[in-house]
Amino acid sequence: MILLSATPHNGYSHSFRSLLEIVEPTDASFTGDKTVVARRVGRSMIRRLKGDISKSGADGSRIPAFKVREPVKAISVSALADAEKAIFKKVSSYCAKTTAAARQTDDAELVSFAMQIIKKRMLSSRTALANTVEKRLEALASRTQQEEAPTRSEVRELQGDLPLNEKTHERIASRIVKATVSKDAKRRSAEKKQLQEIKKLIDQVKTLPDPKIGALVADLEADVLSQPDEKAIVFTEYLDTLGAIKAALDARPEFKDCYVELTGGLSSKKRQGRLADFEKPGKKLLLATDAASEGLNLQRFCRRVYHFELSWNPNRMEQRNGRVDRHGQTRNPIIRYLFYPDSPEDNVLDRLVKRIVQMQSDKVSTPDILGILAGQRIEEALTELDAEGDTTTATDRIFSKLDEGRDSFLREVAPLLMSGRPGYGAKIDPNSLSADQVMQDDESFERFMLARLRTHLKPGQIPGTFSLRTPREFQGPQVAESYPCLTFRRTVAIQYPARDVEFVTRLHPLFQAMAQDAHRQLTSPRDPNASSARLAVRRHPFADEGPYAVFTYLRQDDHDHGQFLAVAIDASGKTLPQDQVIAALDTTFPPGEVPWAEVEKVFGERFKQLQAAAGEAAMKLLEEKAAEETRTRQDFAAVLREDAARYRADRLAEIDLEEKQALAVEEQGQLLFDRREVYGFKAKRASVDTFHQRRLEEIAKFEQGVKPGTPQPLGVLFVFPPEGKHGA
């Protein structure tokens, strides 16, 4: 089993342990000899960062496989009107005070989240803030609680920062904003007064251009529109902000027709169509929401990303950057973000971006940094930030906690993660650090497919491609009825987007359907003791010492589709080496013609004896393989038992330490009850013992191996020397 993840580590060793336990439970203990711990983790985990990977340069030297990002540039949106500065201050204070007032209520968490939504929209665009303030005022003005609160699962989806469909995102956020008004008349009145003041300030600047959109347009005009080979992706979290950006672009003739809009909820066909439009020379911008960012691979023709607002979750920003900063990018990625220096929240986020850069220079990887941040509850801290209070102390507290998380990570988790990386004692296959193309064109596969589909293929418009109407017998799950443009050559496929050229390999559903059809025909159920029903004959230079026969079988012990087995027997009944089998099945030599009378003359009278000898040889071959496999399993079982014993000892030592730490926290000097029951340490120890016993049982079962069954005869290939050579 292989588990692949690009999710950063969250800084907690117990989370890391839970992942290792899925792969190999006996590797999931971090106590004991450091060398042993490193071996455990390195055995179950392979960790590769972009900086580890290299490729061959034009001169044969090794060069980085990924282009290094240019330094991230912050676009400061300043020179604001007094009313705009006042909006930031008023909204920040209103959200912080409302959150504090609800702290001891049942709705504390939901109110905090509602205030977080309002703050985020304030920092996105004036339009987004105005719409949200209006909804909150409507809810406060209502005498009855008309809006139903969202379900726990809906809140978790929004809190989890998942790329939800925008309509779903807006609907849930709107319900949270409307459903979290206080039942206390005094608090409602205070809120209404604050929001009305904010609304007045918004009305004062309504006729002024949105300064953030103006800053974006100015930067795009200078560095994107004026450069013939540049395109850019502009990401925003909100549809109303996207609408405001579109309106500003449409008002400028030079921008009006140069952008493509990509939002969630589009059909696959429309999505692909808009991406194809963005690739055209005349389109310079892609306006996208986070719901549309999943699975975008735009590195072939774009390297610029603009974050219209600083996400409160830095991981989301990194996901956006990954649309262009990925394998195949030929230029240095350029990342920019817009922020308001007059907003204390944006100031914190701006400092956070700079701190991330600083941590990267300290050799902490980007995924690790994101993991550290995930555990610091940045969103809550920003929600509680009050612009009318002491923001300096609050900000320092945020970064102090971040530094504590970094130090804890470097001390406790980083050494474990290093176990799976090059240069830290793990044995690393150099090929696993190379981005060089390993597989070339599969010429034999292409020849086979062309021969098998020759009556159904037509030349495609692109050299090396074909169009195909899939034969009825090969139609099935994931197989298209037709392929307008397909290729069997890797060198052709890598030159074009997947939407334009279908790359058919041995793993493609079309070939899998063909293989299954052939398998059904070849292995149709028959009596395993019956004689071979399929006979064929050919000539081959390897038969220059005399004719021989290759008997083929199907072994069905432990594989869904079985395993093919072949034995070569000469005319005297002698078993031949396996290279004779391989040679007989080699298709590079023409098969030649052999009169059937000649086959009968050599093999006719002795066929039954040869078949029996081949059956015995096949069983002997299976028994030898089974014995070898059993020996291998026994050797491995000894290692597994040793690991299981070490795991038990080390895990129990960890639990002992956890119990001591828990007891040290308790201030009471006299125990009134068995505290081990309260903390669950008895249960933890029992769980370790139970797992250890189950593990030993699994190892014993694994060690037994599998006894081979009687293979099913499939067919016989008679091999004769080339014409003119009669053999020995």
Image (spheres, rainbow, N blue to C red):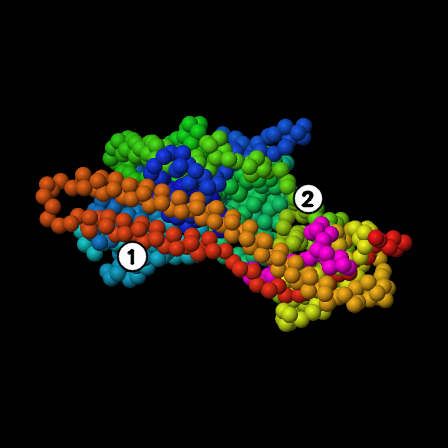
Whole-percent x and y of residue 438?
Answer: 64, 41
Whole-percent x and y of residue 130?
Answer: 37, 48
Q: Nearer the viewer, residue 538 or 255?
A: 538
Vertical side of 399 occupied by 705: above or below: below
Mark 2 highlights which residue? 440
Label 1: which secondary element: helix
Whole-percent x and y of residue 421?
Answer: 48, 35
Q: Residue at x 15, y 49 (%)?
A: 674
Q: Are marks 2 and 1 in contact (CB under 8 Å)?
A: no
Q: Residue at x 68, y 44 (%)?
A: 440
Whole-percent x and y of residue 451?
Answer: 77, 58
Q: Which mark is residue 179?
A: 1
Within the magenta stretch, is there residue 563?
yes
Label 2: which secondary element: loop
Amino acid, disc 2: Gln
Vertical side of 380 occupied by 72: above or below: above
Taking the image as shown, residue 294 lies to the left or right of residue 489, namely left
- Please tell me how crowded label 2 is: few (under 14), some (14-19), or many (20+) other residues with Cα within 10 Å: few
Q: Earlier in the sequence, mark 2 or mark 1?
A: 1
Q: Residue at x 35, y 50 (%)?
A: 692
Q: Nearer the viewer, residue 269 or 603?
A: 603
Q: Is residue 79 visible?
A: no
Q: Give the alpha-carbon distance from disc 2 to disc 1, as whole Å.
A: 60 Å
Q: Residue at x 42, y 40 (%)?
A: 41
Amino acid, disc 1: Ala
Q: Which mark is residue 128?
A: none
Q: Is residue 686 visible?
A: yes
Magenta residues? 555-581
Q: Nearer the viewer, residue 610 or 25?
A: 610
Taking the image as shown, residue 608 lies to the left or right of residue 178, namely right
- Please tell me how crowded label 1 is: few (under 14), some (14-19), or many (20+) other residues with Cα within 10 Å: many
